[in-house]
Each structure stands twice: as structure tokens, then as C-alpha cells.
Amino acid sequence: MAAVAAENVLREFGPFAGHPEGTVTLRRLARTKPDCFIANGHQIDTLRLLSELKVLTSAQIAALRGIQPRTMKDNLRHMWLAGLVDRLETDISPCMYAVGYESARLLRLTLERFSVGSAFRLVAANQLYVAMRRLWPEVDYTAAPHDGVTAQARLGSTTYAILAPRLFPGDVVWCEEMIEYVPDDMRLLVVCASRKQAEEIARAVAPEAMARFTWDTELANGLRLYKRFAGSLEIAENYA
């Protein structure tokens, strides 16, 4: 039954939505290699990106670095074998990558720790960044800038507080509570696991607030942002 439920979640919500029963386990596959070395500047660029954005898929790294996806997968495989990156795996999602022990040692980077919830939220927010970067290369983005928000983006004179609730138990409550702490001078941008979740969270936002919502399947097709309207959502900006 659990396997069937997980399969349904994948079909309806996408691989990084999480699970309403919280039944997803994160495995971190790490290697250590004392004689490890960084082979080239491409590896340094990938490690710097991982250090900044915390958790990424190979497809996200390829998009942000302008590299063919298959080439990026091969590069990451070699980097994992060398202990430069760690693999974060679950039974319902593509592999994710984070800074590994050896690169943290060699480049004095932070070796981050993740729960399955924090990893999925970061990947979801980072997918928004991928979409924004395609449209606005000058966007300034920070993953996990402080306790609370998932990410923060600045475009021109506008700063966005980004929240990325998943289907895990308590995520909607967490998001609704965090909304109350978003400063008045920041715009709220919520990356939800589904449209249904976005509609639920939108009802907790004041109608006059300049909040925007999107969700995983929408980000797979470009960038469409929604606003609260008459108890539901309507398209506010369509960049797809």
C-alpha cells in the first residue's frame, strides 16, 4: 500500500513533493578519499554553486552552468567517486547533490546537513531560481538566507521571500506561520507541491497582499505566477 501511495504522489505532484504521511527516507551517500584533488575549474564552479544553493539535481546544475545534462551527470559521477560531492537519495525522487567532505576540506566549504524535508524544499525553491535565471540573468538569489524562509531573491528594487512547503505533515502550518513573519517591504512568493496546496495556503494570506504562488508542475513548464482571487487562484504573470 505504501508503494502504491508513493507512486500516486509521483504521478500527481512530482518527485520532490514529499508525502503526506511523512514516509520518505533520505539517504546520504558519501565517500572519503584522502588523496583526493580537484581536477579542473569546471569542478570548482560546480562546487561553488552547490555551496551557494545547498542542494541541487544534476538537471538544475546543468541548466545553471549551461552544460549538457548527460555531460553534467558524468561529471557528477566522477566527483562523487572522488568524494567531492555527496549523493542524496530517496525512493521517490531523482538523485540530489550537495558539497562532499573532501571538497569541504579542500575549499573550506560548509558541509551542510539536511532532512528530507529541508532538501526537498531547497530543490523546489532552486527550481524557481532556474526559471527566474532564464528570464532575468541578473536576479540575485540566496538559498536558506536565515532560519525560516527557504530562499530569498532580489530583482531590481523588489525583494522576494520564498517559501517552499511540501506535502510532509506540518508543512502547511509551518508556511502559514512563516507568512506572518515576512517583512512588509518584501514580496511573498510560495512554491507549493500542488495547486490544491497553493489554494489552501493562499486563503491564509490577506487578499490585498502582493503574494504570488506557483507549484512544481507549473515550474516544469516555465514560470507562471498566480494570485489569490475569490477563494481560488488566477494567473497574475505568465512568463511561460
Image: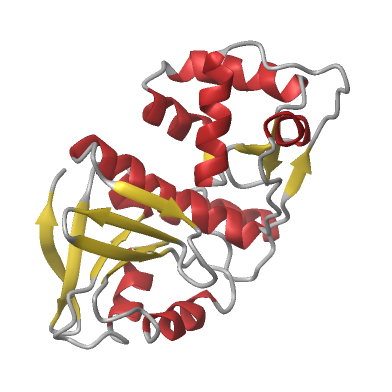
Left or right of 43: which side holds 69? left
Residue in front for this viewpoint, 176 or 94: 176
- Which residue is outermost to the right? 34
As drawn, 37 above or below 127: above
Comparing 64 with 47, the one in front is 47
- Picture colour scheme: secondary structure
Whether residue 17 is visible to the viewer of this picture, yes or no, is no
Classify 38 as above or below 229. Answer: above
Picture coordinates of residue 8, whole percent (x, y): 52, 55
Quadrant housing the N terminus: bottom right
Q: Residue 38's quadrant in the figure?
A: top right
Residue 216, image x, y percentages: 37, 53
Q: Residue at x 60, y 62 (%)?
A: 117
Residue occupying image coordinates x 11% and y 57%: 237
Residue 7 makes an appearance in the image: yes
Q: Quadrant of the C terminus?
A: top left
Task: Measuring from the top left, give residue 140's x and y in whole percent.
Answer: 31, 48
Q: Residue at x 12, y 62 (%)?
A: 235
In the displayed image of the protein, which residue is found farthest to the front? 108
Q: Residue at x 56, y 60 (%)?
A: 18
Q: Quadrant of residue 227?
A: bottom left
